[in-house]
Amino acid sequence: MPPIVIDRLIKSYNGVLAVHNLSFVVEPGRVTGFLGPNGAGKTTTMRILVGLATPTTGTATFGELAYADLSHPQQTVGCVLDASFHPARTGRNHLRVLAPTAGASDRRVDKLLGQVGLGKVARQPVGEYSTGMRQRLALAAAMLGDPDYLILDEPANGLDPEGMRWLRGFLREFAATGRAVLISSHQLSEIEATADDIVVINKGRLLAQLPMSELNLGDGATRARVSDMRAAVHALGAIGADVETAADERGAYLRIQGPDVSRIGAVLFNSGIVVDELITERRDLEQEFFSMLERSR
Amino acid sequence: MSGALRAELRRISTTKLWWITLICIFVLSAGYAALPASVALLQSRAGAISPFADPGIIRSVYNGGNVLSRILAMVVGIVAIGSEYRYGTVASSYLATPRRVRMLLGKAGALLIFGVIYGITSVAAGIAVAVPFVLASNGSLLLDQPEIWRSIILGVCSIALWTMIGMGIGILIKNMLVALVVGVLLGFLVEPIISVVFFLNRWDQLLNLMPSGATNAMLEITSPVLFAARHPTPWWLAGMILATWCLLPAIAGMLSAVRRDVA
């Protein structure tokens, strides 16, 4: 299965560049998180990829093929873009309308409705659905043709915690079968828990494309609030720790890098220093994301 | 193609509009067929030959509902396209059938099929109304005459073509409510007024070129009540004129829809 290739993509609306010379690759077998602030060009890129918008120059293809050139588009690519429905149509009929071109039977429609947890409301008009139920229906629609690629624009919007958990597991399983997922989301903790790779863009330009593993997320420095700062700096310096003083709204504290938190605790205890707080700081995707944006300015 | 057509047939048949329109067309067509039938019955003198043996009268009863049914069929065409833009579902249509011309042809095919169903319903109501009048006045349904069948079939076709006119308006005017107002105003007010002006001035050639004039000529309706031209074009030419009326907005709309980004 070939990757999704975005190649030197440019899209301008009336002279304003929404996407500016953007190139990246979405590998099969992996979940790729597509990140960027509002207006960065994520949605525009995804809409070009599935043929809803035409690029000014450049290409966005599945392997070599543009979306419109796929012989069975719904069996190749599943999309959740803006989850639009006719309010009077039932959830089941919404899928049945999309089924003939996806090569899906009514039985598959009913099976998918059950899988996304809409079995009981399948014959109710979509107008009566909650936002989360609509998102589930949109996901079921994307899966109708059992596609190789999933393109999801903010699929977690309106999902409850249980729905998000389900989505995470679903995407991991999907990618584990060798298929490709491109997912944009504002919920960076969701991306952190789901994605294998991330692509970060801002103002239509690529800031970074890298595997999550290269971000070195996880445990960072240790934060300590102690009764005697000078004694603590001295004791920790003696075991080779890198110590600096910092301050926040609750007062001064120490940021310690090098030894792990249990070693630090033991040293402070043995030195007879009273410890008010001892916390391992976590570096998460959100911090990385904002520092990438910061660096790009 | 067959997948796109089946999808569009389901798209129309999964909303209420299509069968509400179907019922309206049947009821209103029956009423509008009863009108010329009653007039003919009242005008006939006792003992004289039955008016319901005259092909002209039988034709006007069978196609009595046409004048209203074609507007309702047009409304279905407008709403079928307009609701896609209104609710943003047009994107999923394009995703299912990314070849845009193919997608629009699927929609056109499905609407044409529903237009034929509406046409049959309208004419069936006319025939149903004719039955008691024929029986009461010892007339004939004239269903053994080819020209009556031609009138029936052309009546069905004309209503189907008006569905296509609606589709064209729906593609050209993206706002469904505006498209509906424009369509109904054109069909019920503007077009009839222009036709009346042409009729009163005896400008038959211009009148024959109007959508309603072409429909009248196609059905070989000569009643001055419907402002039909005194010298209509032959039915086949009238059919081509009406087809042009539905193709023009549809093709113009397709050309604009094929190029534009989907909002």
Image (cartoon, grey):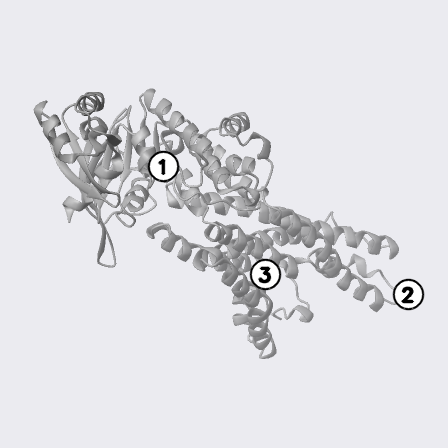
Pick out the residue farthest to the right: B47
Q: Secondary structure at mark 3?
A: helix
Percent from the top left, x then y, of residue B50? 84, 60
Q: Residue at coordinates 10% horizontally, 22% vertically from top-left?
A: A239
Q: Nearer the viewer, residue A278 or B218?
A: A278
Decide which of tag 3 and tag 2 comes sooner along the chain.
2
- Please indicate whether residue A197 sits to the left or right of residue B61 in the image: left
A187 left or right, relative to B198: left
Query: Residue A195 occupies which quadrant of the picture?
Result: top left
Between marks 1 and 3 in the image, the one whose residue lies nearer the viewer: 1
Q: Left of A118 or right of it: where is B249?
A: left
> x and y percent of residue B9 in the render?
54, 41
In the rendered view, tell whether residue A121 sits above or below residue A297.
above
Q: Name the residue carrying label 1.
A: A152
**Distance between the alpha carbons at the discs numbered 3 and 2:** 34 Å
Residues at discs 1 and 2 both on one chain: no
Q: Nearer the viewer, residue A211 or A174?
A: A211
Q: Nearer the viewer, residue B52 or A91?
A: A91
- The disc labelled 3 sits on which kind of residue? Thr
Disc 3 designates what residue?
A: B215
Chain of the residue under the numbered disc 1 shown in the image: A
* Same chain for the residues under marks 3 and 2 in the image: yes
Residue carrying label 2: B46
Q: Position of residue A290 (x, y in %)?
A: 22, 42
**Nearer the camera: disc 1 or disc 2:** 1
Q: Is residue A292 above or below residue B250?
A: above
